[in-house]
Amino acid sequence: MEFQRDISLAPYTWFRTGGPAGFFCEPETDGDFRKALEFAHERDLPVFVLGEGANILVSDGGFPGLVIHQADTDIEVVERKGEYSLVRAGSGATIPDLIEFSLENNLAGLEVFSGIPGSVGGAVYINLHYFDDLLSDYFREGRVIRADGGEILRVDRDWFQFGYDTSTLHQGEYYLTEATFALHNADMRDTAFARGRREEIIRHRNRRYPESHTCGSFFRNFLPEEVNLTVDGQDMIFVGYYLDLLGVKGTLRKGDAMVSPKHANMIVNRGQATSAQILQVARSMQQQVLDEFGILPQPECQLIGFDQYPLMG
């Protein structure tokens, strides 16, 4: 495994912005991953583990430490039993590839996440969600490695303490190297239905959301205790609702960074935007919601390589 210097991270992110990594490597095995962590530990380097770059914004100055780009993309069926089968995937495998593999093997469930970019590692880290469906509903166990390059553990679902947009992995003490999911055994008819559902979800997403040069929803939805507005008796937790009322969709922009015309909670790079310009748009969104409604949106997008926290709050 090669350790490279000053590799631009922009091509590895969906925003297509950001500066270089001080060091960069692509481990394919747990042994490689341990070697990478030992390399960083010996040099006192901060570490960032990169998947598909679908939910991150990298500083224009880059990341001064070691970026580990996960390259274990293996997917396999490890057990068929009763109504469910277990599918094991390396943390570098993509969610679209995992869905396609599952359908090819007549296994259903994950197609609900169709059209969402990202790696298995990133999806488990954030507990990928689409409306009321959570990746943790299908997750059974994972293999993790200590951040200091030490022990490798196989841990069950409870260890991850999954929540909305969160998991134990956010503490930075362990990194995921492999995940196992329990999927429903489907007959040919069920699989055909699941494939049709996948296509319809993708069509629906492409109509409602930008398809590239974005991190998806920039801000997480509010928690019920954070809001004081109700609609039809329900707490209005959706940050996009407030941003729509403010009229920022397709109008608020800084340079080539702008709020998507399709969705008020998604920022897009229309060409040559910088991470700084994306942050200007994001701070303006925060300020307007705070001024008008008295609540402050918090990012769902992961902010990487910034010396100081670049948003409000």
Image (spheres, rainbow, N blue to C red):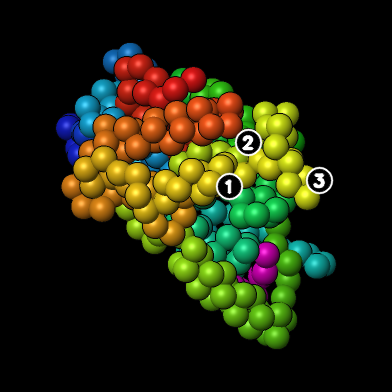
Q: Which of 277/67 is in front?
A: 277
Q: Give the structural element (helix, strand or loop) at label 1.
A: helix
Q: Is residue 47 above or below residue 68?
A: above
Q: Which residue is mark 3?
A: 233
Place of residue 238 in the rendered image (x, y in percent of width and height, measured from the top left): 62, 44
Q: Which residue is mark 2?
A: 222
Which of disc 3 and disc 1 is earlier in sequence? 3
Place of residue 313 in the rendered image (x, y in percent of width and height, measured from the top left): 49, 20
Residue type pointed to by label 2: Phe
Residue 241 in sight in this render: yes
Q: Give the structural element (helix, strand or loop) at label 3.
A: loop
Residue 38 horizontal side relative to residue 243, left or right: left
Residue type pointed to by label 3: Gly
Place of residue 227 in the rendered image (x, y in percent of width and height, measured from the top left): 68, 32
Residue at image location 76% in from the left, 64% down from the top: 84
Residue type pointed to by label 1: Tyr
Kindly report the distance in space between the C-alpha atoms of the residues bearing marks 1 and 3: 15 Å
Callout 2: 10 Å neighbours few (<14), some, many (20+)?
Answer: some
Q: Which residue is mark 1?
A: 241
Residue at image location 67% in from the left, 29% down from the top: 226
Boundaries of the magenta span: 103-109
Residue 186 horizontal side relative to residue 146, left or right: right
Which of disc 2 and disc 3 is earlier in sequence? 2
Which of disc 1 and disc 2 is earlier in sequence? 2
Kindly report the distance in space between the C-alpha atoms of the residues bearing marks 2 and 1: 11 Å
- Image quarter for residue 192? bottom right
Q: State the count of labels.
A: 3
